[in-house]
Image (cartoon, rainbow, N blue to C red):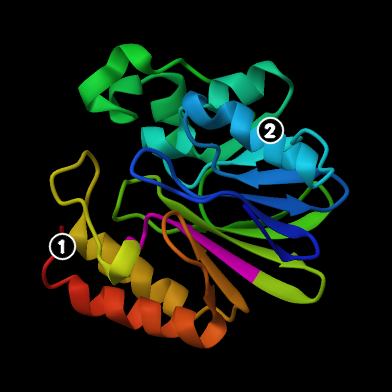
């Protein structure tokens, strides 16, 4: 775990099972992705360590299990789940899209707010731009949060560790849309880039990370 900025936290650093889980502190606590139930208590414990209230909102970057499997627990405990409508469809109905290899482990989750396209909303006292960035999945989204005079860009698995992209065999993968999404975020002004796995990046590092991903679209995982 790490306090990256005064009101920006890495509650869980992703591993082979789980994604990075970030928290924003505004009027309310907002989580970016929530991981799997195995690490729920650890994430909550890290929130308590930083004196963060239980999250009022969970923003899901995409439906894959390592990013969303715990959403039903948070939702049951009062958090409002927010996701692109395609991601919501997977969480609420087509659960095979969440974890095709282990569908029985997926619990249906109510999505409070379904985002259709690019829009800007106030979530927990924080202005957040919702940016549809399909390619990794059809509902993949990036979030640009404006907080304390900085802009934080959360990209989920649009770019994987090492600047790789994929997965070409997964449900909803679309290489051409992924290229378009990378070109889209390349134009965004941000101060920090925070992906779904691996380290986070400063503006200069983040721009290089995006360029590396664009090169790697020639050979997706």
Q: Is residue 60 above or below residue 103?
A: below
Position of the C terminus, as image quadrant, is: bottom left
Secondary structure at badge 2 equals helix
Q: Which mark is residue 44?
A: 2
Asked if labels 1 and 2 touch by Cβ distance under 8 angstroms, the answer is: no
Q: Circle 1 sits on which residue?
A: 220
- Name the residue furthest right: 27
Identify the residue shown where x is 62% and y is 36%: 43
Identify the residue shown where x is 34% and y is 29%: 98
Identify the residue shown where x is 67% and y is 72%: 151
Is residue 110 visible to the viewer in this orientation of the structure?
Answer: no
Is residue 161 visible to the viewer in this orientation of the structure?
Answer: yes
Specify few, some or many for label 2: CA neighbours under 10 Å numbering under 14, 14-19, or 20 or more. Answer: some
Q: Position of residue 129 (x, y in %)?
A: 63, 61
Q: Position of residue 23 (x, y in %)?
A: 68, 50
Q: Position of residue 107 (x, y in %)?
A: 45, 15
Q: Nearer the viewer, residue 141 or 44?
A: 44
Q: Position of residue 50 (x, y in %)?
A: 79, 47
In this picture, which residue range is highlighted in magenta? Answer: 152-160
Q: Is residue 212 above or below residue 19?
A: below
Q: Earlier in the sequence, mark 2 or mark 1?
A: 2
Secondary structure at badge 1 equals loop
- Taking the image as shown, residue 93 lies to the left or right of residue 189, namely left
Instruction: Tell me the CA gap for discs 2 and 1.
Output: 35 Å
Specify few, some or many for label 1: CA neighbours under 10 Å numbering under 14, 14-19, or 20 or more. Answer: some
Q: Is 159 a magenta residue? A: yes
| Camera-side mark, 2 or 1 | 2
Q: Quadrant of residue 214?
A: bottom left
- Name the residue furthest bottom: 204
Q: Is residue 77 above or below residue 123?
A: above
């Amino acid at each position: 775990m790490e306090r990256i900025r005064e009101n920006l936290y890495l509650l869980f650093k992703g591993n082979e099972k789980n994604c990075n889980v970030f928290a924003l502190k505004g009027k309310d606590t907002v989580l970016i992705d929530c991981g799997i139930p195995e690490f729920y208590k650890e994430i909550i414990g890290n929130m308590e360590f930083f004196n963060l209230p239980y999250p009022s909102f969970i923003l899901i970057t995409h439906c894959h299990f390592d990013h969303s499997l715990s959403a039903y627990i948070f939702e049951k405990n009062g958090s409002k789940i927010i996701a692109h409508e395609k991601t919501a469809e997977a969480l609420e109905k087509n659960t095979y899209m969440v974890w095709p290899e282990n569908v029985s482990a997926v619990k249906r989750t109510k999505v409070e707010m379904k985002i259709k396209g690019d829009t800007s909303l106030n979530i927990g006292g924080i202005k957040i731009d919702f940016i549809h960035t399909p390619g990794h999945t059809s509902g993949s989204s990036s979030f640009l949060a404006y907080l304390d005079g900085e802009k934080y860009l959360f990209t989920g698995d649009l770019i994987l560790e090492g600047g790789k992209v994929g997965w070409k065999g997964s449900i909803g993968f679309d290489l051409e849309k992924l290229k378009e999404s990378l070109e889209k975020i390349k134009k965004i002004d941000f101060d920090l880039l925070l992906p779904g796995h691996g380290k986070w990046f400063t503006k200069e590092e983040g721009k290089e990370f995006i360029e590396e991903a664009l090169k790697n679209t020639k050979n997706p995982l």
